[in-house]
Image (tube, rainbow, N blue to C red):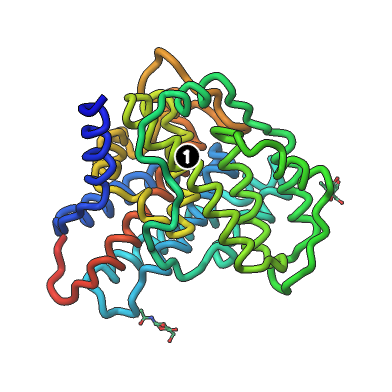
Amino acid sequence: MLKTLFIAGCLWAATFARVFDPKIITEVRKGLEKNLNYIEKNHVRVNVDCLFGVALTIALIDDAYQNGTHIMDKSSLELMKKSLVILKHSIPYAREKSEWLTEAFLHPSIWRKNINFRNNALHISNVPNFKHVKNIFERNYAGGSETDFCLQNIANFTNAVVPTRCFIDERCWKYFEYDESSVGYLLTHKLLILQLAKARKCYLKEDIYKMKTDELCSLIYTEVVNADYYGYLDNMFDLYLEEIVLCGYEGYSEFLQNKWLYYILKSQRPSGCFPAFLDDSLKTRMKRNSNTFDDGCVDHTTGLGAAVLALHYNYIIKEYPINGVEIA
Ligand SMILES: *[C@@H]1O[C@H](CO)[C@@H](O)[C@H](O)[C@H]1NC(C)=O
Ligand SMILES: *[C@@H]1O[C@H](CO)[C@@H](O)[C@H](O)[C@H]1NC(C)=O
């Protein structure tokens, strides 16, 4: 027992040690470039969820841009330009498949915010518990149609320009309150609904928003850490990326650990894309719309891959405001 606790303690404590390696931001930039090139090549067939990752990427890189004073600024401009071209090329195709999703999600400006990274805002237990992993695979109710209904409900009430009082359908509040012990995509979708409401300028009380995101990201973090501890990240890779992207976007730096960044970079295919699972033995059910291509990659996961790399790029630049020499 003592031994288990000790190991667990080390595992959790080792989380934040981050020594800056100037090569790492270059690795992240290259990974992101490769990823965007892949999406551009497939711009006719990638779905809205994938393009949402590209829209988030633009917002995240724009937030990292330091007005020409940071050594990565030239790269930042190039990455944004590349991403904007993708959206320009692919939105006509995406609109054909789902007009409201395209309209609701794909304006980078609605996702633009100043991310202030912080840690220790999450309520987390220090003791590993396999229950959290088991739940992901056994009770992974993705709630696809309910999520779409609620997202569309928000999209219908907002125009993303003028702050609006949003009359959220009762069904969505029920869904939101559905079950405090919900897991997997159900948790990330709840967070996404909240994030879309904020991005599209529903009036939301700042303290309530913070309380809800603290709550959701604490539950989500517990899942990620336990899945990592028990070796299940490969089997839920798409979900794992979604968890990192949505909570990282809220500024919880616990989600942006170095070892996880290396793991993500290592899992990227040479073509730049990402598969939904890295291991075939046991899989989480995939969330709503995703397409698997001939090369084994999935558009949903690949879009998340862009966003997760953009998030790390943003985080590294904010954490290390190095000026001067270009490190390409
Ligand atoms: C960059 O310029 C804009 C507009 O002038 C300003 O609002 C922003 O704070 C600046 N950002 C940095 C990092 O200096
Ligand atoms: C949103 O508006 C569209 C078009 O008016 C309508 O078809 C759809 O049912 C609405 N959806 C929700 C969830 O309110």
Residue 108 pos. (x, y %): 54, 62
Q: Residues within 10 Å of mark 1 (few under 14, many from 20)?
A: some
What residue appears at the point 73 percent right and 74 percent down from the top-left corner?
A: 162
The quadrant of the rendering that contains the N terminus is: top left
- Judge: label 1 CB < 8 Å from ligand 2: no
The residue that disc 1 covers is 42
Closer to the camera, 64 or 86? Answer: 64
Q: Is residue 80 among what the camera can see?
A: yes
- Quadrant position of residue 80: bottom left
| Residue name at image x 59 percent, y 23 percent | 139
In the figure, 112 relative to 292: above or below? below
Q: Quadrant of the C terminus?
A: bottom left
Establish if 38 lies above or below 226. below
Vertically, is 225 above or below 36?
above
Name which residue lies at 37% across and 48% down.
Answer: 255
Q: In the visual, does 314 lie left or right of 175?
A: left
Tell me the amino acid under the disc marked 1.
Asn
Residue 177 image point, x, y percent: 71, 43
